[in-house]
Image (cartoon, rainbow, N blue to C red):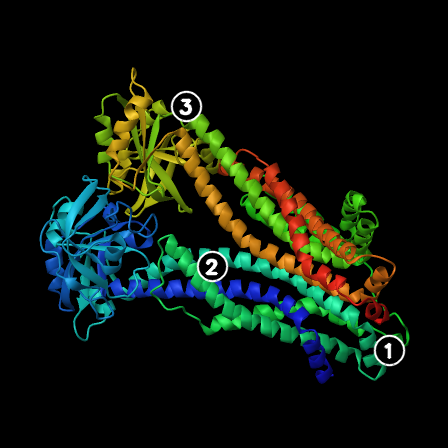
Amino acid sequence: MLRVTLRNLLARKVRLLMSAFAIVLGVAFVAGTLIFTDTMSKSFDGIVEGSTPDVTVRPEGTGSWDQAPSADTRTIPASLVDELGELSGAERADGSVQSQSLTLVGSDGKLVTGFGPPTLSFNYDDAPAMTGEPAVVIAEGREPSAAGEVAIDATSAEKGGYEIGDTVTLVSTGDQPRLEVELVGLAEFGGGSMAGASLVLFDTAYAQELFLDGKDVFNQVALTTADGVTQQELAYEADQILPDGFEAVTGDAAAAQTEDLIGEILGFLTTILLVFASIAIIVGTFLIVNTFSILVAQRSRELALLRALGASRRQVSRSVLIEALIVGLVGSTLGVLLGIGLAQGLTALFKSFGLDVSETPLVIAPRTWIVGYVVGVLVTLVAAYLPARRAARVAPVAAMRDDVALPESSMRLRMLFGAILVVIGAGLLWLGLSGVDNGAWYVGGGAFSILIGVSLMSPLLSHPVLVTIGGLYRPFGLVGRMATQNALRNPRRTAATASALMIGLTLVTTMSILGSSVNKSVDVGVKKEFTTDFLLTNPVGAPFSTAIADQIREIDGVGDVVETQFVPARIDDNAFAAVTATDPPRLFDMFDLDATVDDLAADEIAVREDKADDLGLEVGDAMTVETQSGKYELAVAGTYPETNVTTEYLTSFAFVDLVKLTREDSFVAVNAAPGSSASEIEEPVRDVVADIPTVVVQTQQEFIDSQREQINGILMLINALLGLAIVIAALGIVNTLALSVIERTREVGLLRAVGMSRRQLRRMVRLEAVAIAVLGAVLGIAMGLVFGTVLQRVLDDEGITELSIPVGTLVVYVVIAAVVGVLAAVFPALRASRLNVLRAISTE
């Protein structure tokens, strides 16, 4: 039986390889994701270990917040650094000035890191990291030793087009928005790759002047252990002399904390990519089921003969599963190898966004191979299980009949299960719409349940759709009727083939509706609330210098100028939230917000009405707001209506001082003064930021266009990833038609014998393929319409307030599906038309 199985496998290697290709793509996505994220993790681990000292002395709470150190105004005096250096367990103590408030600008005026990784600024010293090696070394030139001098990492210097002796441009969020300094050295980071970030080093006194108001203080202190002293011993010794509000953290603990924060980000990225991999694998499963079902049907007489010669049902079933096992092994191997290439592609893609880990060799861990084989082989075996069971039910006596038909189980049970899943899914959609917490998750679960249920019920659901398509085929005459009958002949096979395309188009349609609704919501919301003449923002939401607003106020013809700053916080120990700090009276006046409060003290907060209702808050209630500097009790002083102008919580700039943060602006709204027009002040306002590439000035339409561009970019990326499912679905149509043509060889010969031309035969196969593809498109778009509409309604409170159905795009999807059908039919149609008539008629 094993020899027979291997012989059959080799005899049908092309067909099986087409099925294996679905596994190749799915496993490649899984493997590529794991390789890429493992590589990123290794790169960041190198950064963390190469920059973390044996013990770090820092303000309490900073390690648990993804917050730029310079934004925290708590500092450590130089006298304490000297005192820490005299500890018996310390070899040395080095004060560290740190900032992420600068951005490196290239000689061409463009940002060196784009709007991706940050520019990390430090005072230069040769203090060792916990690895024992200096965190930074000067590879070329010299270290900065005076004001106006700087050293940067060699990679950033190359990207920016700088050489030693050049004048380097930096954009700052401080009092001086733009700096020009002399490049005196090129640095190398001891941890290896910088993952796309830029490194800027200053003399200590100059760094203190730039970031710490010229005071002889530091953000943190790096302690190096003396010989024979452990990190824990030195941290304990340092804790004994530290004032309240400061902590000594071992290098291992600090590194673990940082790696946990990075791990959360990488975990989210991994999940997103693996979702698309799962979609590809689910779609590929339909292809594998179809392939083995058809192959088993074509070998029915052969299987009957094996049973007649003494093969047991178990042996017959096992032979099919062995074929599937080999297909799974081959597909998984090729998939992991292709995944290596995919990981390189992801590395290049993220490098274009500024996140560069190309200097770190790809990490191909044993786990990647294990997961790849488990996924590929398991999916293939599961997909082949039902065809294998059907093969085992062939009776030995069937070998004596001319025509052997495989036993088909009743579709009643399948329809029942499908109907139950659809009902469950509808219930979950209703729950999501009812306003329950995490409603989007209920919608996702309901959509998945309905998707599987409709896939099970598709043999029945396909009939009216195919009959309708057949009506459209009337101009093709007999060829059109035969194509329709061929599609209707085996509803299981047709539905399974169409289901693969259906899943892909369901997801694409859902995302298209969601994206279109987001765009429409932005249009409506911005036109309603963007009542200012100009808005100054950073394209990625990073802060910028308050000096820019001060300069704009001095322009003749400028009226109201309102600044806001986003403060990261946790509300009542819940998840992260952004608090908007501003000058409330001026904000309420400029944007005509009907707030129940005029102004706010440092210990007061206003809450958006819908959020106040959710939390059961009323004016006078107390709430806990936690920032990097600790927890603060604030009184709810008032509420304001739902708006996109601010976040859910609003405070004054006095709150920024209270929580010990540096004042920076997140966006600035500008209006022309009475008697002046927006056109009169537009050029002077734009001139203020003309040489600051991190800040853009936008009118209402420019703001809408920028938001649309971001949304459409994300949508294009999602659709490109979902396109993988469409490719697999197209392969499924090719495979099904090719195997179907082989299965109907005698029928094709008879059609040719009674006068059907080769052109008519090719047209018949193409029309059958188009019918299958359009069936998948109709079912997919129908479900996508439901899911997209429900999802928009559930996300109404998140700002997606308008439903928009892109009818033109959906029509294009149907047309694309038809084109996919035509292209998928090229090879099967050509093969059918080339069959020798006499041989085809005599085929058994």
Indicate the position of residue 75 as horizontal and vertical percent values: 18, 49
Question: How many circles with numbers are drawn on the protein?
Answer: 3
| Secondary structure under the numbered disc 2 in the rendered image | helix
Residue toward you, 357 or 275: 357
Name the residue rendered at 13%, 59% in the picture.
143
Mark 2 or mark 3: name the one nearer the start of the chain: 2
User: Which amino acid type is shown beneath numbered disc 2?
Assistant: Thr
In the shown orientation, is residue 648 left or right of residue 481? left
Where residue 811 sits, quadrant-wise, is top right
Residue toward you, 760 or 470: 760
Check disc 2: other Cα within 10 Å, few if <14, some if 14-19, many if 20+.
some
Which residue does the numbered mark 2 point to in the structure image?
270
Name the residue rendered at 30%, 38% in the picture.
695
Q: Which disc is residue 420 wearing?
A: none
In front of the other: label 1 or label 3? Answer: 1
Name the residue rendered at 33%, 24% in the picture.
598
Q: Is residue 118 above or below residue 597?
A: below
Residue toward you, 604 or 653: 653
Which residue does the numbered mark 1 point to in the structure image?
396
Mark 1 or mark 3: name the one nearer the start of the chain: 1
In front of the other: label 1 or label 2? Answer: 1
- Mark 1–mark 3 Cα distance, whole angstroms, equals 83 Å
Indicate the position of residue 153 as horizontal and vertical percent values: 23, 59
The image quadrant where one finds the N terminus is bottom right
Check disc 3: other Cα within 10 Å, few if <14, some if 14-19, many if 20+.
few
In the shown orientation, is residue 567 left or right of residue 183? right
In front of the other: label 2 or label 3? Answer: 2
Residue toward you, 276 or 831: 831
Indicate the position of residue 55 as horizontal and vertical percent values: 22, 64
